[in-house]
Amino acid sequence: MRGRSNQGNGRGKADSGGRAGPCRCIVHPRTRRDAAGAFRCAFGGTVIRFENVGLRYGTGPEVLRDISFTLPPGSFHFMTGASGAGKSSLLKLMYLALRPSRGLVTLFGKDMARVKRTDLPALRRQIGVVFQDFALLDHLSALDNVALPLRMGGARESDVVEHCTEILRWVGLGNHLNSLPSTLSGGQQQRVAIARAVINRPRLLLADEPTGNVDDGIGMRLLYLFEELHKLGTTVVIASHNEALIRRFEHPRLMLENGRLHVLPAHASRWA
């Protein structure tokens, strides 16, 4: 198995719950860039744009109706709504895992209706994504799962091991660097998936209930990790039903209600 690292005890400050200092592999000065400014120049101020988008499965009724919004580079939004409101479907539209039934979707300045299927992998490599099925590779260790985006991008192996070890310790998995997914709990698998999604500092991060399988201490720690990415210019969308955690942060909401989207400012208290 590639990239094995001495697990050590992996504990201490990086494994405790709650807020801590930033993860060094995310904000390391050798890799930090002025992402927000670069993205604004490249995409004309918009990372994602939806215009009158609708989505239906098969011949059924529309589950999303007349969805219109824009996400500027470096923005951070929570996505909220009742169970079954369509949060996962909307995230999959953003990730290009689903095609809309109608309307316009642009990603990184490209009209998705005009993008060839063969070009989708290159676009998706710019997105970090955490869905509720985690999608870990069963035959790879936690470290090797996290390392996939870096290795695909041609990073030096010494940097791969260093950065993946650091982020796994930071999310409290320092004792599980070489563990296979089948030996991890659901919450631990979720943290591996989150580490993999953020390790390459994506242009866009999409996460579906990323704190759903962890306690509030770890949940806050993960949200602070997303906040660090946001400060570095990553556009972040987090779907969550955890009101207590969301209210700790001053970010606007994309609220789904009866298949329609309402964009609420950061101070809004309405909850679905």
Image (cartoon, rainbow, N blue to C red):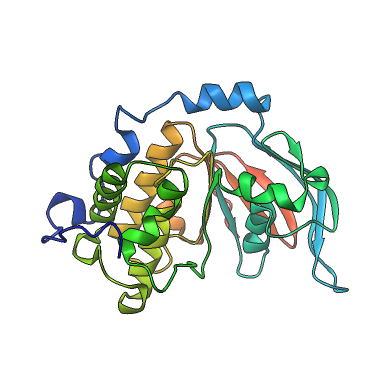
**Front-most of 249 and 21?**
21
Left or right, residue 263 beside residue 195: right
Q: How many marks?
A: 0
| Residue 145 in view (yes/no) | yes
Q: Where does residue 92 sit, x and y in percent of width and height?
A: 65, 58
The answer to whether 147 is drawn above or below residue 1 in the figure is: above
Q: Where does residue 227 sit, x and y in percent of width and height?
A: 40, 40
Q: Residue furthest bottom?
A: 182
**Front-most of 65 and 56?**
56
User: For the N terminus, which image quadrant?
Assistant: bottom left
**Front-most of 32 and 61?**
32
The answer to whether 7 is drawn above or below residue 230 in the figure is: below
Q: Where does residue 176 sit, x and y in percent of width and height?
A: 24, 66
> Residue drawn 49% across and 28% down?
35
| Residue 195 in view (yes/no) | no
User: For the C terminus, which image quadrant?
Assistant: bottom right
Q: Where does residue 268 sit, x and y in percent of width and height?
A: 56, 44
> Residue drawn 43% across and 66% down?
212
Left or right, residue 131 beside residue 32: right
The answer to whether 219 is drawn above or below residue 203 in the figure is: below
